[in-house]
Structure formats: C-alpha cells, structure tokens
C-alpha cells in the first residue's frame, strides 16, 4: 500500500522541495522539521547533481552550492536516518537518473526504502525508459512518481495508467522557476488522469504565491513548490529556517483552504 496516498487522504497537500545540503545538511535537517511543523503534507528532498537539466537558475545554483560544500548521496542517506528518529512526514527524493545509476539502482532504492523514504522522482527519465527504475522501486515499496507535461495529452492516459503514489503535473513547459502567471489548463490535465486512474494529482513548476497555490489546489489534489523556497535558502543561508517556515505555513494554509 502506498504511504503517499495517506498524504492526500481527505485533504489537499502542500509539498515543498529543498536541495539537500544548501546551505548545509544540518540546516536541511532543521528545515524538514520546521516545514513539517508548518503544515507541509510531504517533503521533496533534492539530491544535488552537477547537470540538473529540468532546473532553472535558482535550483541549479543551489545544486552547485551543495556539491561544492561536499554533499554526497551517502551523507544525505545519513541525514535521512537522523530525520526518521524525529519525524514520520512523508518524504520523496528528487534527483537525476545518473545519481541513481552511479550509486547502483538496486542499492540506492533498497537503502532509501530501509531509511523510510516513500517516493522517488526522476525528471529526466521519460515514461518509455522508466521500467528499469520502476521494477526496483515496486520491489522495495517505493513509489516512482510519474510526471506529465502540458504537451503529453495523448500520453497522459498511458502514464496515468501505470502511475503510483501521485501524478506530478508540470504546469509549464521549460525548467523550474517562479512565473508571474500559469496559463496551462491544469483542470483538463487532472481530468484526463482521473478518467484513467483514481490517483492524486499535484501541480508543480512556476508556483510561488499563496494566490497561485490556492488556484492550483482548487484544480488538483496538491501543490509543489521548489524555487521560491530554494531562493529563500540562497538568500538567508544559515538563517533561512524561520523564513522558510513562515512561507510554508502561508502556502499550506492557502492550499488547505482551496
């Protein structure tokens, strides 16, 4: 049974994303506790990669800061082990295929599962190539989260049919980042998914204000925000925890009220 489904049970979920190790793994750990306390339903933990193709400049810069600070996959796993002593909030890793490959897919997924991770998001793995990851994830009880983009209309049904956990609806074409407005017909994307499978849909890419979050939540089951949070981490460094906590509280309330 997918633990992620509980995140959306009877409520809309706000899902913040942070880059592990930016500004440090100690601060990342504090951010997780603070965001859980501020109303986050689930948290995405980004494992930094030197060439994060889906990311805009804000998250790219965070990846480079974290890597130059010496963050490794093993150190992130150690941090999750510490986290799990204090919080049971649902957690998903977001990273790139190369990170998992180079660690060893079986080893990576097995360790993630043993640490109590619930999901894995690999934005650079197309649907047609997901099998080599999906099989391992299913074996170890981790949901490989599927992404659907505004262009993949005829593919949405196909992707939805095999999706697990939740479906990540990409609101805008291009890379991650804050946008002044979102013009994609999110409602239509969500309806296509739901016609195929009864699975939660969360919208991400480009959302940064409580107003945008409330609008997107009214059309879906949850809202994902990364760049706006990572920007606060970059701006305030080690002093970012309170700023992020206040932001997550405002966004969680906007999503819950939608």
Image: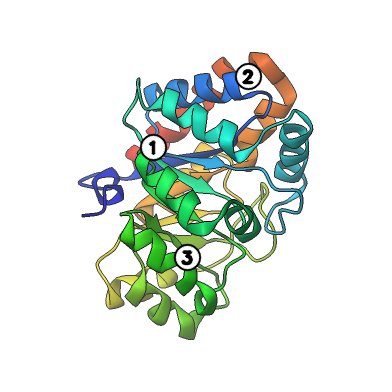
Q: Could you tell me which residue is drawn at 33 percent across and 62 percent down?
A: 138
Which residue corresponds to mark 3? 133
Q: Position of residue 248 (x, y in %)?
A: 48, 29
In this rendered view, identify the residue nearer to me: 222 or 237.
237
Pointer 3 or 2: first along the chain? 3
Question: What is the distance, in whole Å, between disc 3 and disc 2 at their CAs?
Answer: 34 Å
**Residue that numbered label 1 is attached to:** 115
Q: Nearer the viewer, residue 57 or 136?
A: 136
Query: Residue 168: where, in percent of width, then height?
Result: 46, 59
Crowding at dot 2, Cα within 10 Å, few <14 / some 14-19 / many 20+, comes out as: many
Q: Earlier in the sequence, mark 1 or mark 2?
A: 1
| Towards the viewer: 246 or 91 | 91
**Which residue carries the number 2 mark?**
240
Q: Could you say where residue 4 lies in the image, as x and y percent from the top left?
A: 31, 49
Instruction: Determine the residue positioned at 67% across, 15% down.
Output: 238
Comparing 165 with 148, the one in front is 165
Work out how far the residue at label 1 is from the one at label 2, CA to CA, in angstroms. 26 Å
């Amino acid at each position: 049974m997918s633990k992620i489904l509980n995140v959306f049970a009877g409520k809309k979920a706000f899902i913040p994303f942070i880059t592990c190790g930016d500004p440090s793994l100690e601060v990342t750990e504090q951010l997780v506790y603070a965001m859980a306390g501020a109303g986050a339903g689930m948290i995405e933990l980004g494992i930094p990669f030197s060439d994060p193709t889906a990311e805009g400049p804000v998250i790219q810069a965070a990846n480079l800061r974290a890597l130059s600070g010496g963050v490794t996959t093993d150190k992130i796993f150690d941090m999750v082990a510490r986290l799990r002593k204090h919080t049971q909030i649902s957690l998903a890793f977001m990273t790139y295929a190369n990170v998992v490959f180079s660690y060893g897919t079986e080893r990576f997924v097995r360790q993630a599962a043993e640490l109590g991770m619930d999901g894995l998001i690999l934005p650079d793995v197309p649907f047609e190539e997901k099998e080599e990851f999906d099989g391992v994830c299913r074996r170890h009880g981790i949901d490989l989260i599927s992404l659907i983009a505004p262009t993949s209309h005829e593919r949405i049904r196909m992707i939805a049919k095999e999706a697990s956990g939740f479906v990540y609806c990409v609101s805008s074409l291009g890379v991650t980042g804050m946008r002044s407005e979102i013009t994609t017909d999110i409602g239509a994307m969500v309806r296509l998914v739901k016609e195929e499978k009864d699975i939660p849909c969360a919208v991400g890419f480009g959302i940064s204000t409580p107003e945008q979050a409330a609008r997107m939540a009214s059309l879906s089951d949850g809202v994902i925000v990364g760049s706006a949070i990572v920007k606060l981490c970059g701006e305030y460094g080690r002093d970012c925890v309170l700023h992020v906590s206040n932001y997550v509280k405002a966004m969680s309330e906007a999503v819950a009220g939608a």
